[in-house]
Amino acid sequence: MSKAYYIIKGSFVEGTLEAMGFLKTMNIEEGSRSKENPWHQVAREAPVITHVLFVDDSLLFAWASRCYNEIESLLAKFWRGSSKDDKKILMMSWTKLAKEKGTGGMGFMVIGDFNLSLLGKHFWRLLTGGSCLLERVFKSRYYLRTALKEAKSRFTPSYVWRSILGSEELVEEDTRWMIGNGLKVEVW
């Protein structure tokens, strides 16, 4: 259940666990004091984390394009149904198959674009704020006293952080400022 802290607000998870009858002592803070698990604090104000929280994440982050090409090649072979002994004829090119259905393609997923969209979701989550574990760790490590868009790394940033920041341009080109109730807008 501790992986839920990564995606969902902590107060929601704690309330749900309490309603289901789990003991209050069975939580991340209790586990962090335990000597059995390798918990680490990446910065002074950061919560303690462990690598086990991120074991089965499906995000590819920003792997090299060679890896993308290899995955797409395997997907193309799968969709064609070809094997070593049997060669089948493909009626459309992979680029046309990967186009959206509305533009004449078949809507097959392009791994690089899909990965960039997932990274964009993480960037958006950091930008809009919340209390997820990812935001608290990155905020304490990379932009504690500034806004996310002004974050400058004084040291070698992690691979994950560089990957998420790489999606900033994609997020910015598709976002607009909305006034809403006016509480966050200063007129003077």
Image (cartoon, rainbow, N blue to C red):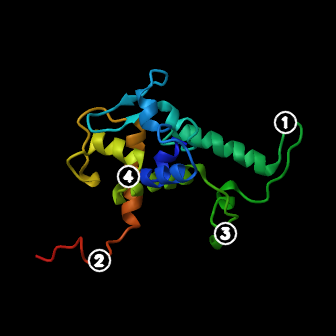
Q: Is residue 22 left or right of residue 173?
A: right
Q: Which mark is residue 29?
A: none
Q: Amino acid at mark 3?
A: Lys
Name the secondary structure under disc 2. loop
Q: Kindly check if marks 1 and 4 are in contact, taking CB atoms under 8 A apart as contact.
A: no
Q: Kindly check if marks 1 and 3 are in contact, taking CB atoms under 8 A apart as contact.
A: no
**Disc 2 target residue:** 179
The residues tagged by marks 1 and 3 sit, at their Cα atoms, a distance apart of 31 Å
Q: Amino acid at mark 4?
A: Ser
Residue at image location 69% in from the left, 60% down from the top: 97
Quadrant the C terminus occupies: bottom left
Residue 116 seen from this side: no
Residue at image location 41% in from the left, 45% down from the top: 133
**Disc 3 target residue:** 101
Residue at image location 83% in from the left, 48% down from the top: 81
**Disc 4 target residue:** 131
Residue farthest left in this picture = 188
Q: Kindly check if marks 4 and 2 are in contact, taking CB atoms under 8 A apart as contact.
A: no
The residues tagged by marks 3 and 4 sit, at their Cα atoms, a distance apart of 37 Å
Q: Nearer the viewer, mark 1 or mark 2?
A: 2
**Disc 1 target residue:** 84
